Every structure is written in structure tokens, then in C-alpha cells.
Amino acid sequence: MTYQGRFKVWRGDAEGGGLVDYEVDVHEGEVVLDIVHRIQATTAPDLAVRWNCKAGKCGSCSAEINGRPRLMCMTRMSVFDPAETITVTPMRAFPVLRDLVTDVSYNYTKAREVPSFVPPPGVKAGEYRMMQEDVNRVQEFRKCIECFLCQNTCHVVRDHEENKQVFAGPRFLMRIAELDMHPLDAAEETGTDRKRGAREEHGLGYCNITKCCTEVCPEHIRITDNALIPLKERVVDRSYDPLVWLGNRIGRR
Ligand code: SF4
Ligand code: F3S
Ligand code: FES
């Protein structure tokens, strides 16, 4: 079935902009990114959009469709009523560069602030051994395609620009959780305290587990339940466990 779809696409730049109406053919099996490409091919060749794989794997085509953060290439037109006007806007939490393209450098800044995996001393590459359950636990987090939809959705930064300084966001708190749970990570032995860093440098306490990040993740990673809540528990154990506290006191003498 082919029908004439109605779309409103945000056009503009850092100075401002607004929604522009388009009427475009929609064919069976198409996704929102196909429509954006058809708008480019027919009426608006200068419409800026970022995309790469059209397979839900590169994480480039994040936007807001009818106000909901989604990947344009994974949003089928068949989920909408043909009579409905579809609105496509750029991710709201990041500064607009042009049209649907935002400046996501906040995320790369936060990524750089997370200390990398520290290989265990005396174990060569190829000799790493882990229990299968430890592999399974961190493997879920490795499915992340860095679409930054979770970062865009979390109210801590979406509604409070000023929090970007102190809050790493769900994607990077999940990365810290992944490394902290990793049985071979030797960061602590080299003086990097990931739990302290999560709390004091990456703003773990700002997360009040609303789970909006989990709801929008296209990889269905259980960010809140499997990364953020366990990280909070580990941080609390470290901060308030009286034995750990006593051990630290004795160790300092
Ligand atoms: Fe995207 Fe999910 Fe990764 Fe967040 S955790 S960046 S929503 S894939
Ligand atoms: Fe934000 Fe996710 Fe926590 S939406 S508040 S990081 S549970
Ligand atoms: Fe790669 Fe959409 S174009 S995830």
C-alpha cells in the first residue's frame, strides 16, 4: 500500500528554527529514515540528517519521533496511522547543529572521563579467564551502540543543562558499572577507585532510578536494573559497610 503521508520536520540551526510541513509518498515496509531520505531526494536536498547503517547498529540516526526518542531507521511507518501527521525533531538534550543533526560531544567528553580497563598484572592477552556468569553480566552492556538516546532522555540532563558538568549520564554510569563488575579489571590496584569516582566525579547520586533511559534503549539493555542499581548498591556497600570503614581506618594508620 502506498499513501501520501504528512510530516513535520524541524528545520533550523543554533540560531533557531521551526517545524516545516512535507507531504511525501510512504510505501509498504518503510521506516522513518526512508521518508527523511525521500524528502531530501524530492523537495529539500539541504535537509541535514545523520545516519550510516540503516540497520539499527551504528547509533547515528537518533531523533525524536512524535516526541519520543527513537532510531529513525528502526521506526517502521506501519506503527503510525496513515492519517496521522508524524513529527520528527532533533534530540532535545543536545545543541542543534542543523536540522536533525545535534552536537553530541557531551557524550564523548564523558566517555573520556571514565578510566579505561586496566589489564590484570602478569596475565598475557589470550590468558584471560572469566566465569561464564561474569561474561554474561558484562556482555549485555557491550551491546550498546552509542545512540545516546538514553543520555537524551534522562531528565537529569534533559531538563537541567547545568547538570551536564557533574553527571555522566546512564550510558557512562553503565560503563563504570561494567568495569567495576569486571573480575579482571585491576584499576583498584593502580589507585583508581571506580566506586568513589561514580559517586564523586560522575554524579551517580543524581540518578533517581526513573528508568526512562531503559525504556528508550533500542538494544533493550536493562540499564537501570542491571547497571545503575547494582552500581548504587556497590557504592553504598563501600561507603557505609562498617567493616570496610574499619578496614580503611586501620589501613590508613
Ligand atoms: Fe543507546 Fe542503549 Fe547505549 Fe544508551 S545504552 S547509548 S540507549 S544503545
Ligand atoms: Fe536517568 Fe536512567 Fe537514572 S533516566 S535518573 S539515569 S534511571
Ligand atoms: Fe545506523 Fe540508524 S542509521 S542506527
Image (cartoon, rainbow, N blue to C red):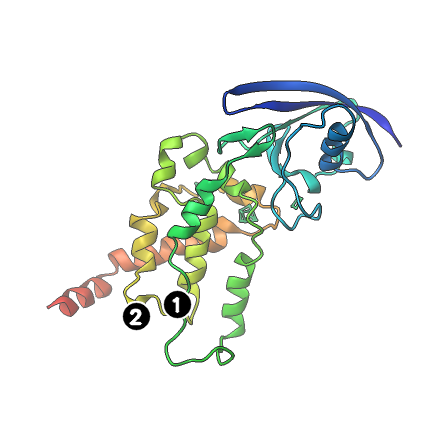
Query: From the viewer's perspective, is 181 left or right of 12?
Result: left
Residue 110 in percent (x, y) is at 41, 47
Specify the quadrant that holds the C terminus: bottom left
Judge whether 44 appears above or below 112 on screen: above
Q: Which mark is residue 118?
A: 1
Looking at the image, do the residues carrying marks 1 and 2 touch, with CB atoms under 8 Å apart? yes
Count residues near mark 1 (Cα–Cα under 10 Å), then give few for <14, some for 14-19, many for 20+. Answer: some
Tag 2 or tag 1, which sits nearer the N-term? 1
The residue drawn where x is 74% and y is 21% is 22
Residue positioned most to the front: 46
Label 2, on which residue?
189
Mark 2 neighbour density, 10 Å: few (under 14) some (14–19) many (20 or more): few
Q: Which is in the foreground here, disc 1 or disc 2?
A: 1
Amino acid type, label 2: Glu
Q: In this picture, is 140 found above or below 124?
A: above
Q: Where is residue 77 drawn, in percent x and y?
A: 76, 34
Residue in the foreground of this view, choosing between 43 and 243? 43
Residue labelled 2 has its Cβ within 8 Å of some atom of ligand 1: no
Identify the element where label 2 is drawn. Answer: helix
Say whether residue 21 is left or right of residue 238: right
* SS under mark 1: loop
Kind of residue sitting beneath label 1: Val
* Residue 156 spot, x, y in % from top left: 41, 36
Instruction: Give x and y (percent) for residue 215.
Output: 56, 42
Examine the rendered structure and indicate whether residue 159 appears above or below residue 62.
above
* In this rendering, position of residue 207 left or right of residue 35: left
The tally of labels here is 2
